[in-house]
Amino acid sequence: MILEKDPDCPGSLGIAISEAIEDTVTSKDTKYSLGSVLNHVLLHQSIVGLETKKQLTQIGETPDIMIGCCGGGSNFAGFVFPFIFDKMNKKKKIRFIGTEPTACPTLTKGPYRYDFGDTAQTTPLIKMFTLGHNFVPPGIHAGGLCYHGMAPLISFLQNEKFLEAKSFHQNAVFEAAVTFARTEGRVPAPETSHAVRAVIDEAIKCKQEGTQKTIVFNYSGHGFFDLSAYDRYFAKGLEDYEYPKEKIEAALKELPNIGQ
């Protein structure tokens, strides 16, 4: 149906979820488990943050800034949630920065509303920052970050000002990724490179201010399957997309008008 309306539609994670649910409910031997946005997945992923906390204890360090990329939220939440407890209860001054594409600015430009988790509106309503369930991302190379909504727990913490959110254009992201690869010998995925961009920016800021801070980020994935994207970057073939304000306003009109 979507392709009938737009034969060139690049698709979206919201559409993919709808199709997965459709296949599940029409097949007797199929079950479906959502893997990122729901809160129980975030809590399951917190094993990453717990391990990070133990590693920092072993070297006698405490973080001043923690950075991760944000798509649906499980990667970022799993990394920082154990430390958010410390900030809430032990009054530790830690900054938590979630990074996302400027082309998909869920946390930085989306409203905090009830919305569906998929395009066909088959999921339960979720209170979250959202660009609207009909959001279709432009063709950038960080597909895993191009989900229209954000996990409820992250959305709540962002709304309560426990977190910071920053968005970046993909050329700036790949510039940071290349710097990281040349200095560290690891090729980061485009999604992970959003966190790398923020780390470099924060490190430069510390240098300019003459301050010392411990910056910890989550290296969430390698970029060996994204080398064509790096090739396009080196060929200066990447475009930077700014998600238009009018599209956000249009999406708002299609959101359920409840709980506002």
Image (tube, rainbow, N blue to C red):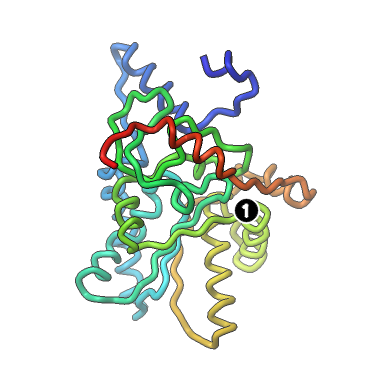
The quarter of the picture where residue 193 lies is bottom right
Q: Give how far across and how far down residue 178 sits, in percent.
A: 67, 60
Residue drawn where x is 26% and y is 40% of the image: 259
Image quadrant holding the C terminus, namely top left
Q: Is residue 161 above or below residue 202?
A: above
Q: Is residue 199 above or below residue 133?
A: below
Residue 141 lies, in percent from the top left, at: 61, 43
User: Horizontally, is 38 left or right of 172 in the view?
Assistant: left
- Residue 21 vertical position relative to residue 161 in the rendered view, above or below: above
Residue 91 occupies which quadrant of the picture?
Answer: bottom left
Question: Could you tell whether 170 is left or right of 109 in the image?
Answer: right
The picture places residue 238, in percent across and down from the top left corner, at: 72, 46
Q: Which amino acid does label 1 sit on?
A: His
- At x 42% / y 62%, what residue is drawn? 164
Residue at screen point 39% across, 33% down:
255
Percent across and percent down for residue 145 are 50, 45
The residue beneath circle 1 is 169
Q: In this view, does 258 lie to the left or right of 164?
A: left
Q: In the displayed structure, would residue 59 be above or below residue 6?
A: below
Q: Is mark 1 on a helix, strand or loop?
A: loop
